[in-house]
Amino acid sequence: MAQSLKLTLQRPSLWGFTAPLTAAVSAAFGYIAGTSFGNPLVGIVAGAVIGAVLAALLHPMAEKRMMARLGVIAIFFAAGLFATNLGGGIAAGLVGAVLSWFVFWIDTGDYRKGVPIYYTGGQTLWHNSFVFICGLIFFFLIAPLFPVMWLSFNAQDFFTFTPEMLAFDPEGYSLKHYRDFLTTDEWMQPLKNSLIIAPIATVISVSLGTLAAIGLSQSHVPGRQTIMAVLISPMIVPLIISATGMFFFYAPLGNWLELTLGLNKSFVGYVKVILAHAVLGVPFVIITVTATLVGFDRSLTRAAANMGANPVTTFFRVQMPLILPGVISGGLFAFITSFDEVVVVLFVGSAQQQTLPWQMFTGLREQISPTILAAATILVTISILLLTTVELLRRRSERLRGLSPS
Amino acid sequence: MKLSKILLATSAVGVATAGLAYAGGHMATGSFTLVSWGGAYQASQTNAYTNPYSANNPGVEFVWDESSAEAVAKLRAMNEAGNLTWDLVDVVASDALRLCDEGLAMEIDADEMLAPAPDGTSASDDFGDLLVGDCFIPQIVYSTTFGYRTDMVPDGVEPPNDICDVFDLETYPGMRSLESRPINNMEWALLCDGVAKADVYDVLATDEGQEQALAKLDTIRDSVIWWNAGADTPQLLADGEIFIGSTYNGRLFSAIVEQNQPIGMMWDAQVFDLDGWIVPAGLPEDRLARVMDFVNFATDTQRLADQAAYISYGPARLSSAPLVGNHAELGIEMAPHMPTDPNNAKNTFLYNYEFWADYRDDIDAKFQAWLAQ
């Protein structure tokens, strides 16, 4: 009894607050739905009416919130299914879920939960708008990826949402683009090339970048800032300019390797691309390792020296384990840089070194085949896995730094 | 820590050696780099030219580079850097003429280097006037023409069958797509602005004529999506974003016949163009001998006819035409889908290489300025 009394005391007015707000939100959905049926105005009006009615119906049901929401979702789903197809049903169900959540969120006063009790109406509004804007930013960052993933299962050879796809008809979906990707040489050869070039370039940039970062963290190195700027320049100089320069730099180098040393043409091609990509990866390694070195306690190396360890042993036994997370995240960035790189390889590589991004680039320009989307989906998945690893390592690094004596 | 260090070191070394070993093992000594356009066109070349050639010459490994779109720029750069990685390049005729003028393509003596027709006709007579310039070895005749959505034709109206229907927004409402360059568009605009076909290039050579063409294009400008790649128009048609759009006829053929899209062909005032090989100038002896052997095989009468079984482009040799058969997979007769078929070729243009060589830069600048307005 006390509980429900408290609830009713806090609840805002239905017709003065909850219903108009819900109607407004619902009208926005109505606009979208109306546009897809060719009549946005009717959509807005219908949306507003449905919103107001929904608010009035749900108002007395605050106690049985779960039940009420499930009911709304089911009704919306059925209406969408009836009016269009399965796809429309699912979309309408989602709208129902959002709207019913919104009604209760407003109606029960939950919207004040995130703010201190003394906030005025304006401050509360600003707080919630702020959260909404943040959510919107995330949405705009992530949303473009979903159509790409969705379309990669298209049964047609175009970047088009077919009516079958929108109806969630199994006929409209197919894994054939994944099969194309995984079984044709046109895609597997570039994938193999990427998997040769990226790891080797990463190993080179990690070794050189780590050494450079350790050297540059010593206070007695003359011209530290200048050397740092030069080493980081591949990240700052527009890629197309680096690429043009590299083309003219590596062409005579390649000729020399081929003609004077008699190395195989294709082998020299790989060497050129790997070196070019290693250069692009170095700045990432330097930056992450330098950042980890800031938290590294120099007295540890002195202590190691004091105990008779030479600098190499000190590096591998003392310093390396502590900065390893920085080295690994730098390496991951270097790997992704090489794995995603298209400009430099277009200039420096020849057809035998065609990498995955190169194949995607030409494929997109010449044929617009959804196989590119399948490849993109696979790459996005790999990137997500790699970045998750980076994040886990970063947390580990923070934990370790918390323990290190500094 | 020790374990992870060892793991890291071994995996790094392992990856590096395995990768290089793969790269090393994968290198074929006889690799032969062909440059083409990718997609269905390159697939037709693989099926008609390189697969049979490899069957006879097992030592040769073909590597395809899909760089024909930037062939001129890349060949220039390769020439400057002294690092020629291409053996044979597929380009459109106008690019072949430019490369020939700049000395980047090798001059060809058709009768000496190319195979005669089966009945003994010399290669130069067999290709006829398609042998434009001194370096170009034609393979196919393609056309830039229009495709329209059959389900978007307004009720009670004939489907478009005249080039001027593209400019008729009242009878055929909806978006159009045109290539974002003046070539073809300017000719079509003049043709639909009352200029006789025979006078089109005389008019277009004058400033007033160029203004007139742009003014005509102005009338549909708000309804035009400008494309840059041949794949754009089929995609836009499949999306239903446009009603009618220009592109290469082979792209439309594949969308209609292979992808079952509701698209119809509008062949009126199609513009023929040629695509073929050039041999880069300055190939070393051994590579050149191999290239010429391949070119001789790949441009003979039978090979050019075979290519038409995979894509709806007309073979460049007269003697190949009677040999054109059915589609290799779908089994349909290919002749009616060829731009050169008499039913389709009632009103055609041939890309005017001389005119555009002289006026391209000038008209291009005006056209781009007009586009940017």
Image (cartoon, coloured by chain):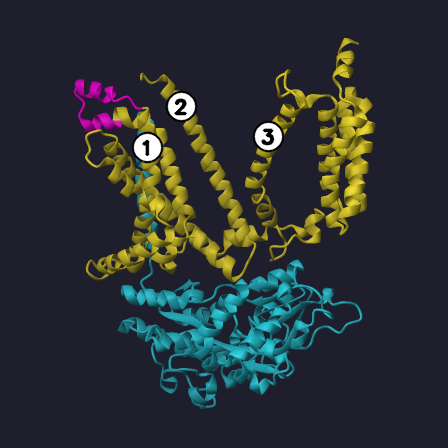
Chain colours: A yellow, B cyan
Q: Are marks 1 and 3 in contact (CB under 8 Å)?
A: no
Q: What's the amino acid at mark 3? A: Phe
Q: Residue at x 77, y 38 (%)?
A: A77
Q: CA distance from mark 2 to mark 1?
A: 14 Å
Discs 3/2, front = 3
Q: Residue at x 66, y 72 (%)?
A: B167
Q: What's the amino acid at mark 2? A: Glu
**Where B361 sits versus A235, above or below?**
below
Range drawn in magenta: A296-316
- In the rendered structure, does residue A64 fall within the stretch colored magenta? no
| Rendering quarter of residue A232 | top left
Tag 3 residue:
A130
The mark nearer the N terminus, 1 or 3, is 3
Q: Are marks 3 and 2 in contact (CB under 8 Å)?
A: no
Q: Choose between A360 and A35: the one closer to the eye.
A: A35
Tag 2 residue:
A398
**Where B157 sits versus A140, above or below?**
below
| Rendering quarter of residue A19 | top right
Label 1 element class: helix
Magenta residues, dominant SS class: helix
Label 2 element class: helix
Tell me which chain the residue with mark 2 is part of. Answer: A
Q: CA distance from mark 3 to mark 2?
A: 29 Å
The mark nearer the N terminus, 3 or 2, is 3
Q: Are marks 2 and 1 in contact (CB under 8 Å)?
A: no
Tag 1 residue:
A289
Dot 3 crowding, Cα within 10 Å, few <14, some 14–19, many 20+? few
Tell me which chain the residue with mark 1 is part of. Answer: A
Q: Choose between B243 and A127: the one closer to the eye.
A: A127
